[in-house]
Amino acid sequence: MQAKLLQGKELSQKIQEEIAIKVQELKAKGGRAPHLAAVLVGNDGASETYVSHKVKACERVGFKSTLLRYSDTISEGELLAVVDELNENDDIDGFIVQLPLPKHIDMAKVIEQISPKKDVDGFHPINFGRMAANMPAYVPATPDGIIEILKRYKIETRGTHVVVVGRSQIVGTPVSILLSRAAYPGDATVTLCHRHTKDLADYTRQADILVVATGIPGMIKGDMVKKGVVVIDVGITRVADTSKQSGFTLKGDVDFDEVAPKASYITPVPGGVGPMTIASLLKNTYLASQKAIYRN
Ligand code: NDP
């Protein structure tokens, strides 16, 4: 058996085309383009890349975007004031504060300061709680992208055993909540594993659907999965590679060469979950512009 690739890149392009059409329709009716703002603190290379992808994606679908850059010497109080201004600015539908933040800034405090109505990253506890309660909410972009992949490839989740490896607040935990909800995709029995899980392979071998988000390149080997498993590899780690002009290659958390021959479906890295994250952020911003989650 050779797994079918879950082509997140193609799917993301399709979703972006769908959003672009909606934006054209909005503008044709005299409406204004959705507007996303991104706050970038410091000069972290990966964060710069992520934010520039998000800004470019906004341009592609016809959104307005604003990038606000601050030095990593910005104080917590000053950053909270920036968030307040964005909360109050009626021209901005949604905004994100790119993580990680410098150590002297309390990330949780900044996230809590963001108005849930403009929290298109879905990190605010109110959105997290609404998501868990199966109420309309901004769902964090990466988990939402995973749900969208399962939906668009019509992968059955009801009654399956989903094993999620990694329990971060932005990936593993929300994925586990979403797939255990009474919904589609959902209705699964979910096991959430982390670094204290004893004999991880015992669990991963039971998975009908395996979601891995640890940041440990290649940790899931061929003998850790059963035949026919659906594999969602969230990990993206830069691994040194002198044969590449960039000096690195991107590796997932799953040993693709060993696992793909046993799987029924698998996401490639890159080109799987990563591009879906952008599509979901755009989707959330569009929803914010239409006040689709919160009425006022
Ligand atoms: P975090 O570092 O926040 O979380 C990693 C999780 O993995 C933790 O819950 C940790 O457990 C768990 N873990 C670590 N080692 C083991 C182990 N040996 N066995 C089982 N579990 C383990 O990472 P993120 O969730 O933020 O990101 C994970 C990966 O996904 C990274 O490569 C990141 O770059 C990528 N990512 C990709 C995105 C995309 O768009 N495709 C978006 C976001 C992230 P514990 O809680 O016990 O410490």
Image (cartoon, rainbow, N blue to C red):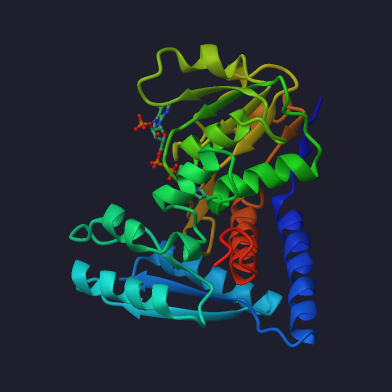
Q: Is residue 179 left or right of residue 28?
A: left
Please state the total of marks drawn on the protein image. Answer: 0
Residue 102 in the image: above or below residue 135: below
Residue at 30%, 52% in the rendered image: 108
Report if residue 32 is visible in the image: yes
Tell me which image quadrant ligand 1 sits in: top left
Residue at 60%, 49% in the rendered image: 136
Residue 204 in the image: above or below residue 139: above
User: Horizontal and vertical percent for residue 21?
Assistant: 80, 73
244 or 195: nearer the eye? 195
Quarter of the rendering occupied by the C terminus: bottom right
242 or 184: nearer the eye? 184
Rendered image quadrant of residue 98: bottom left
Rendered image quadrant of residue 186: top right
User: Horizontal and vertical percent for residue 74?
Assistant: 22, 74
Quarter of the rendering occupied by the N terminus: top right
Q: Is residue 83 left or right of residue 238?
A: left
49 or 113: nearer the eye? 113
Residue 37 in the image: above or below residue 76: below
Residue at 67%, 16% in the rendered image: 226
Residue at 46%, 42% in the rendered image: 129
276 or 289: nearer the eye? 289
Report if residue 75 is visible in the image: no
In the picture as drawn, the residue positioned furthest to the front comes out as 296
User: Horizontal and vertical percent for residue 234?
Assistant: 56, 42
